[in-house]
Image: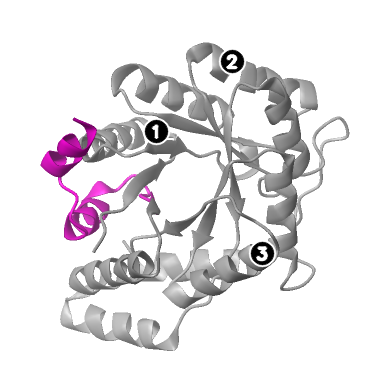
Amino acid sequence: MTTPRISFEFFPPQSLDASFKLWECVQALAPMQPEFVSVTYGAGGTTRKLTHDAVATIQQNYGLNVAAHLTCVDATRTETLEIAANYADMGVTEIVALRGDAPKGASRFAPHPDGFADSSELVAALAKTGKFNIRVGAYPEPHPDAADRFADVTWLKRKIDAGASSAITQFFFEADTFFRFRDACVKAGITAPIVPGILPIQSWDGVKKFAARCGATIPLRLDEGFVMAKRDGREDLLALTQCTTLCSRLIEGGVQDLHFYTLNRPDLTREVVRALGISPEVALEKVA
């Protein structure tokens, strides 16, 4: 089996305890030599400054290639581009450009009157600066706001045409979900890399709630499996097996890159990565 390139997503801490967990997570996963790591925005852009601070700390102290999330939520075009310019001044050359979720208290996204209307406009403005490698989001299953099942492919092509170099998908539970989406993208003329987003299952109840919000289909067999595993005290083993099997199937299907949503909890992600043949020693050999 081919050894994949990997990347990790972290989220900015909002408390002292969360800060310790983030830095422990970064320290645990940095030796795996990821291609890049990303740092998210909170819902509605609520962690904008925290994201900036986390990006700066990782950039300065860990020697990792950091991709900062940037959204269209609750900011003017000028404010958003000032944030991007500040990242460029810090030496950050990777941006994950997203529309973003609805601000707190709102049921749907609505652009700021003087802001970017959507992620394709944001991508185009960032591309015009010539300072960034721009990644975007992709949805292998219909986004909750999608007009129809083809809308997500159309939107992705629009973002790639605007200047994005690659896309990272929302998480999913079955490899065929990704393969169907990838095939549809190829048919639509999308040639940019599409990287599967992988969510190691730390808590099945939590993942089910997350899946319901973002429209990810939960296979019945997986739900039944976790119910039985919880009863028998084997949830960790099932989580490792499920995630490793999913990644292996993706690699067998030609996937070369995997992006892990760590939730700032490194252990399961590290075990999966090791099961795929990546260890700190192997990672260092690849770099040498």
SS of the residue under disc 3:
loop
Say if 84 sits above or below 146 in the image. Answer: above
Residue at image mark 2: 86
Taking depth in this image into account, of 137 and 20 the one nearest to the observer is: 137
Q: Quadrant of residue 268?
A: bottom left
In the image: residue 5, left or right of residue 13: left
Q: CA distance from mark 3 to mark 1?
A: 31 Å
- Residue at image coords 43%, 87%: 220
Query: Which x, y percent locates residue 187?
Result: 67, 68
Q: Nearer the viewer, mark 1 or mark 2?
A: 2
Query: Which x, y percent locates residue 130?
Result: 65, 22
SS of the residue under disc 2:
helix
Q: Which mark is residue 143?
A: 3
Residue at image mark 1: 15
What span is in magenta? 260-288
The disc labelled 1 sits on which kind of residue? Ser
Q: Nearer the viewer, mark 3 or mark 1?
A: 3
